[in-house]
Image: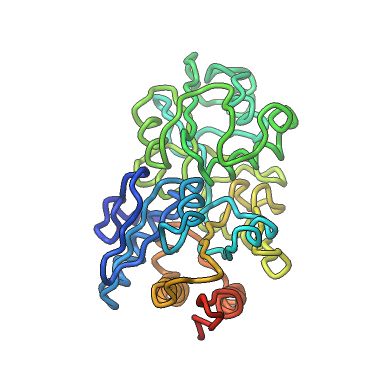
Amino acid sequence: MKARIVEVSCLALSLACLSMPLTAAAGEITGAGATFPYPVYSKWAEAYKAQRDLSLNYQSIGSGGGIKQIEAKTVDFGASDMPLKADKLKEDGLVQWPMIMGGVVPVVNVQGITAGEIKLTGAVLADIYLGTIKKWNDKAIAALNKGVKLPAQDIAVVHRSDGSGTTFLFTNYLMKVSKTWADKVGNNTSVEWPVGIGGKGNEGVANFTAQTPGSIGYVEYAYALQNKLAYTMLASHDGAYLSPSSSTFQSAAAHADWKNAPGFYLVLTDQAGKESWPITGASFILMHTSQEKPDRALEALNFFAWCYTNGSKMADELNYVPMPQAVIDIVEKTWSEQIKSADGKTIYTK
C-alpha cells in the first residue's frame, strides 16, 4: 500500500469560503469544485509553482459548487466528479474533459476492525444506507464476515451534506446494485438520504467518521489513507472481494472508452472484471468555450497540459490513476478545436 499522502493544507492551494467568489491575483489561476481530486491538484500546483511561478487558487467546495461557479464565470475553471452530458455542455457553452481517475471507498469506525477486515457487497452497502441494516452484527453483514467479531452496535451512517461528485459516484453505484435504492433514492450529486448525518466535503465525511464510533462513510481513497480510516473490502462486479488500490482502480479504468463518449461523458462504476474496484470514477475540468480573457485561459490550459505530462508519478503516489496518453491527445485536440477567444481565435496549440 502506498502511504505518501499530501497534506490537505498544502500552501499551493487556498481553501476559500463557498460563499465568497474568487478574485484572481497576478500570476494566479482560479478554480473551484470537487474535493475528490483536491490532494493531487494540490500536489501538482505546488510543483508547478516551483517551476513556473504561477499559483493555483482552488476552492475545494464540492462538484455542485464548482459547476455553479464556472457557470457564473467567477473562476477560470470548474471541477466536477459528475460529468455533464453533451446537450448540457452545449446549452451552457462549456467544454469538459477527464483530468484524473480514482476510487471512492467505504470507511468505517468500528472498535477492533482494521482496514480491509470487513467485506461488503453492493447490496448490503445499499441496505446500510437505506437504514434497513441497523447494527454491525446484522446477519447480512455477519454472513459475509465469518470469524470477524462484529459488535452489537448501531451503525451511524455518514454522507455528504453538499452537492458532491463523490456522492454522484457512490449513489450511481448503489443504484446499479440495488433496485430498492434505484426506486427510492436514485442517483445525483445530492439526494434525499434515508438516514444518517452529513459532512461537508470529503474532509467533512472523513472527520465525522473518524470521530463517530460505529460509523460508516464514503470518501476518496486518499482521504481514507490520510485520516487513517479503516476501509472495507467490496465485492467487484464479477464477485471477487477487493481492497482499494491503484491496481484495482486501474483495472476499472481500463474499461473506459473515452473515444466514443460524447463530451467525455463516462461513468466508471460497477465495471466488469474481477479486479475492478466498483466505485471508480474520473474527475473532470470544465471551462467555457468562448473566453473573454484568453490569456488567463491559456495559463490554465498550460497548467493542465503540464500536469498531464509531468504529474503521473505524483498522481500514482497518491493512488490516483493518470489519464492514458491516447486520451490526453484527444483532450488537447478538443482544447484547440473548442476553446476560443471571444473573436473566435484558437487559444491553445500544442
Image coordinates of residue 160 in percent, x first then y, are 48, 35
| Closer-to-camera residue (199/342) | 342
Image coordinates of residue 185 in percent, x first then y, are 66, 30
The residue at 44%/76% (across/down) is: 294
The residue at 64%/34% (across/down) is: 121
Q: Which quadrant of the view contains residue 177?
A: top right
Image coordinates of residue 94 in percent, x first then y, are 58, 63
Above or below: residue 30 compared with residue 204 = below
Above or below: residue 334 compared with residue 1 = below
Which residue is outermost to the top? 152
Above or below: residue 245 compared with residue 205 = below
The residue at 31%/63% (across/down) is: 24
Image coordinates of residue 246 in percent, x first then y, are 51, 57
Q: Is residue 307 visible?
A: no
The residue at 62%/76% (across/down) is: 330
- In this picture, residue 177 sits left or right of residue 328: right
Q: Is residue 50 visible?
A: yes
- In this picture, residue 270 sits left or right of residue 220: right
| Badge count | 0
Colour basis: rainbow
| Closer-to-camera residue (110/206) | 206
Above or below: residue 181 compared with residue 203 = above
Q: Which quadrant of the view contains residue 193?
A: top right
Which residue is outermost to the bottom? 350
